[in-house]
Image (cartoon, rainbow, N blue to C red):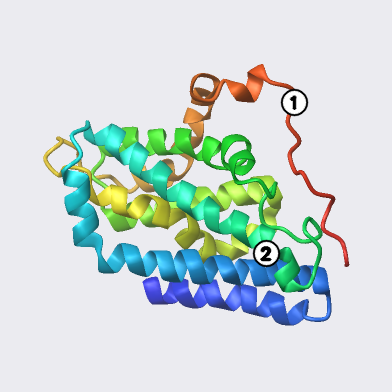
Amino acid sequence: MIIALGAWTALVPSLALIANWKNPVHRAVMGMAWGLITLWIVGGGLVMWHWRGTWDRLAAGVRLPWMLKFVLGCTAFALAEEAVTTLMTNCAPLFGVRLGEAYITSSANYFDVVLYHSVVVFVPLFVGWAVILRFWNFSPFAVFLLFGMTGTLCESLSFGPQNLGNYGMWAFVYGLMVWLPGRWVPPDRGAKPPRWWAYPLAVILPFGFLPLNFLLAPWLWLTAKHPGIHFPPIGGG
């Protein structure tokens, strides 16, 4: 499964890069995507996998309720992933275009990205998964795959249905946020084995927790309306 997802992850941006090679703006976007794949999926994924025992021991030493530990762990990895994406957006001149001409985040400011556009939305989804794991005993790999599907839906709803065809990459981008924290969930918590219908339900159920942002992120509705994207539309078509 991992090999198949890895091949899928490499194939889609490779074909897109070839198809847009003569277009400097879209070529830059594909270059940023490859930077994300290299730094977060390959680099970050290998660090998580190779030292998974060390990460597990460090998490075991944190004296917090497991549900809170899961949410905080997922949030920490999401913050790390968004650091990579924001770095890629700021590397636009290295890809031959001006800053803001090509991008893969809504802003070039990291704190703006995580507080208004990305991680702030992910946290309620992580809370939803903590609740799901309280009742169903999904394996860490199942959490990886299912949250990857949830993330693919997020990307498709936000940026277009073409993202459905790029599940391979989104499975890793989002799945790596939750895989290690999924290993920190105690097996003796009284959760039941999931039935078949629990799998598709687990993909969409986290969206039901998005209203938590009224409590978790009051700045989203207490401050002035925030722009969805801080850059002009990507051109060069």
Labels 1 & 2 near each other (Cβ < 8 A) = no
Give the labeled residue for mark 1. 225
Q: Is residue 8 visible?
A: yes
Q: From this viewpoint, is residue 197 visible?
A: no
Q: Quadrant of residue 145?
A: bottom left
Residue at horizontal 34 percent and vertical 44 percent from the top: 73
On screen, residue 102 above or below 121 = below
Q: From the top left corner, tell me how far across and down residue 11 is, in percent.
A: 58, 78
Image position of 132 (left or right of 208): left
Residue extending farthest to the left is 188
How far apart are labels 1 and 2 at the CA level? 28 Å
Report the mark closest to the observer, 1 or 2.
2
Q: Quadrant of residue 32?
A: bottom right
Q: Label 2 neighbourhood size at 10 Å, few (<14), some (14-19), many (20+)?
A: many
Q: Which residue is mark 2?
A: 91
What residue do we see at 28% from left, 37% from top?
A: 69
Q: Which of the two discs, 1 and 2, labels the residue nearer the N terminus?
A: 2
Three-letter amino acid code at the position of disc 1:
Lys
Please indicate whether residue 235 sits to the left or right of residue 100 in the image. right
